[in-house]
Image (cartoon, grey):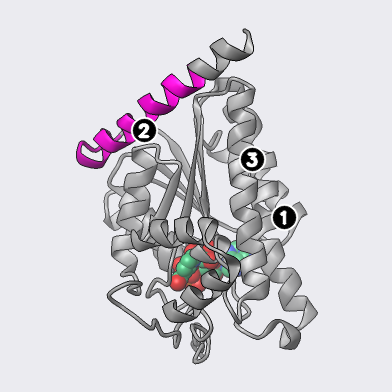
Amino acid sequence: MNFFLETLKVLVLSIYFLLESLVLLFVPVRKKSVAGEIVLITGAGSGIGRLLALKFARLGVTLVLWDINQEGNKETSKLARENGAVRVHAYLCDCSKRQEIYRVADQVKKEVGDVSILINNAGVVTGKKFIDSPDSLVEKTMEVNTMAHFWTCKAFLPAMMASNHGHLVSIASSAGLIGVNGLADYCASKFAAVGFAEAVGLEMLALGKTGIKTTIVCPYFINTGMFDGCKTKWPCLLPILDSNYAAEKIVSAIQREQVLLLMPRSLYFLCFLKSILPVKMGILLGDYAGAFHFMDHFRGRVKKD
Ligand SMILES: NC(=O)c1ccc[n+]([C@@H]2O[C@H](COP(=O)([O-])OP(=O)(O)OC[C@H]3O[C@@H](n4cnc5c(N)ncnc54)[C@H](O)[C@@H]3O)[C@@H](O)[C@H]2O)c1
């Protein structure tokens, strides 16, 4: 195709896609059925992972639950069954260990089958200034929040590609889009998770594997306990999200094959501003939004005795 024709095609399609997204603001896309899918959720032993399991439990899927916390994972299994799930398989898996991910993934393939919806949700946070963060915790953050996504995709993506059917879901964070004071290693891990998910999604498109969908989730603080103590400066602009609401939005985004989900909605505007404003103005607005002090009172999840 020559330059003129290709440019014209891009312009026409751009206008079409803009109009389409405007229409979709008012007419939501229909939710796809996930009945019969094998859904693997990492970090299913508490918080968002558990709530996702409970919401998928009602949708006729086979659940595969991974967590390093066996007790929490067993409890999620029990609750999922009470919520209507018929097939629930819980596995102990330390997602910071590549070989363990591969070993448990093989076990899942033998005992349950090929995973068709992979939700990388397990996450950890150090909660210290970078300079005070022990190296071991920085490494753990990268291993769980980023590298685990590589290894789970390596394990489960080939079967999805063979059948041209599947869905990769990355539970990242707004800290994967905007840097936050006091969350350097966490931000690095989440920026990487976002970049990885976006690039793999493109790789699938370029290979013609249009049956493999990607959903990248970037929430602000959620009241699961992971960020206990953290404060939001302007709740009207950036409210701390209710975990049940967040999980509901995530399941709905998966069913609507939404590529990017930011929560709350004001994040779409903040990210847009970040990309167009001069850096100094961005910092001024970041300070105004509270990004310098979000982590000042961080306690994190208090471990039970
Ligand atoms: N809570 C928030 O404010 C918030 C905001 C944005 C993004 N997120 C992200 O959402 C995801 C879920 O967070 P949450 O709030 O439910 O936290 P959570 O602490 O309640 O749940 C995280 C789960 O991951 C598991 N996990 C930790 N290390 C693991 C490992 N090595 N192997 C396997 N499992 C492991 C934990 O046992 C736990 O069950 C995380 O990726 C987190 O970074 C959370």
**Vertical side of 63 occupied by 143: above or below:** below
Q: Going by the picture, which residue comes out furthest to the top?
A: 1
Helix, strand or loop under label 3:
helix
Q: What is the three-letter code of the residue carrying label 3?
A: Ala
Measured Cα–Cα span from mark 3 to mark 2: 23 Å
Q: Is mark 2 within 8 Å of ligand 1?
A: no
Q: Report the disc number at residue 18.
A: 2
At x 50% / y 75%, what residue is drawn?
Answer: 286
**Vertical side of 230 occupied by 123: above or below:** above
Q: Residues within 10 Å of mark 2 (few under 14, many from 20)?
A: few
At x 59% / y 80%, what residue is drawn?
Answer: 181
The residue pinned by badge 1 equals 100
Q: What is the three-letter code of the residue carrying label 2?
A: Leu
Q: Is mark 1 within 8 Å of ligand 1?
A: no
Q: Earlier in the sequence, mark 3 or mark 1?
A: 1
Mark 3 or 2: in front is 2
Q: Residue 45, can we see it?
A: no
The residue pinned by badge 3 equals 199
- Horizontal side of residue 128 vs 138, given as left or right: left
Measured Cα–Cα span from mark 3 to mark 1: 25 Å
Q: Is residue 208 shown in magenta?
A: no
The one of 39 and 216 positioned closer to us in this rendering: 216
